[in-house]
Image: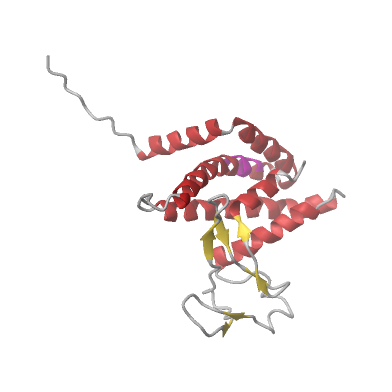
Amino acid sequence: MRVNARAIVMTATELLLSAYGMAMASDEELHEKWISVSFALGSVAGNAHLIALQRNGRLDLMLRLIEAERLERMKDDASDEPIWSLDLQFALSENWLLSAYEVARAAKAPFKASGTDASRLLALEHRLALVRMPAAKGVIQGMNRKPHKDNPPLLRRLGDATPELYQDDGSYMAPQGLCVETGAVLWYPMDVTNGKEVVVCRRDLSNEMLALFD
C-alpha cells in the first residue's frame, strides 16, 4: 500500500498564533496579571489604552519566551544562532516599548490629578521615554529643554575613540545589548538629568509596569 504523505505547511499567521499560544500557556498566572493591570491602568489612561495594554501583555509573554530561549543560546557557545532571530527580538522589544510608553504617558496626568501616588508610574514613564525618544525620533530625551539644549553632551560613537558633541539632527541611536541574566534587550540611552548613559532592560520595564498596583 502506497501512502501519499503530504508535508503540512503552516502559514505565517498560523506560526505566529502558535507562538502566541505557547507563550500564553507558558505562564497563565502572568497572563492573568497583565489582564488585571490592563483594566487598572486602562481605566486611568482610557479604554483605547486598555486594549493596547492587553495586546502588549500578550507580546510581553511571547518576548519572555524568546528571551528565555536567547538566554539558553547565550549560555551555550556552540549553539547555532537562527537567522534573523536577534533582529526579530530587537524589533519586537522596541515595538513593545513604544506601546508601553504611550500607555504610561497617557496615564501620567490623570494619575497625578487623582491624588494617587504616581511616583512609580512617573519613574517608569521616564525610563521608557529615555529609550523611546532615540528609537522614534533619533534624539536624546530632554535635549529640547534648557539648560540641556545649551550644553549638549559629548558622545562616543561605536568604533570612534574621540567623543563628539551631540548633534540634534535625528541621528542619535542608543547603544543596545542583551541582558546576561534574562536574555532581554538592553538599551543604553543618555540621561541628561545626570549626564550619563544608563542601562534600561526590557524585562525590568515589563516588571515595573506589572507592579504598578501591587
Q: Check the image and name the residue furthest to the left.
A: 1
What residue is drawn where x is 65% and y is 38%? 34
Q: Position of residue 12 (x, y in %)?
A: 36, 40
Main secondary structure found in the magenta portion: helix
Question: Does residue 40 appear left or right of residue 129 in this picture?
Answer: right
Q: Position of residue 171 (x, y in %)?
A: 51, 74
What residue is drawn where x is 50% and y is 51%? 92
Question: Does residue 1 appear left or right of residue 182 in this picture?
Answer: left
Reply above or below: 92 against 40: below
What residue is drawn where x is 60% and y is 30%? 28
Q: Nearer the viewer, residue 110 or 75?
A: 75
Question: Does residue 175 appear left or right of residue 4 in this picture?
Answer: right
Q: Nearer the viewer, residue 76 or 207?
A: 76
Reply above or below: 178 against 198: above
Q: Which residues are magenta?
A: 50-55
Q: Nearer the viewer, residue 46 or 119?
A: 119
Residue 54 colored in magenta in the image: yes
Is the image coloured rainbow, by chain, by secondary structure, or in one colour? secondary structure
Q: Quadrant of the N terminus?
A: top left
What residue is drawn where x is 39% and y is 34%? 14
Q: Quadrant of the C terminus?
A: top right
Question: Does residue 139 appear left or right of residue 127 in this picture?
Answer: left
Residue 182 colored in magenta in the image: no
Reply above or below: 168 against 183: below
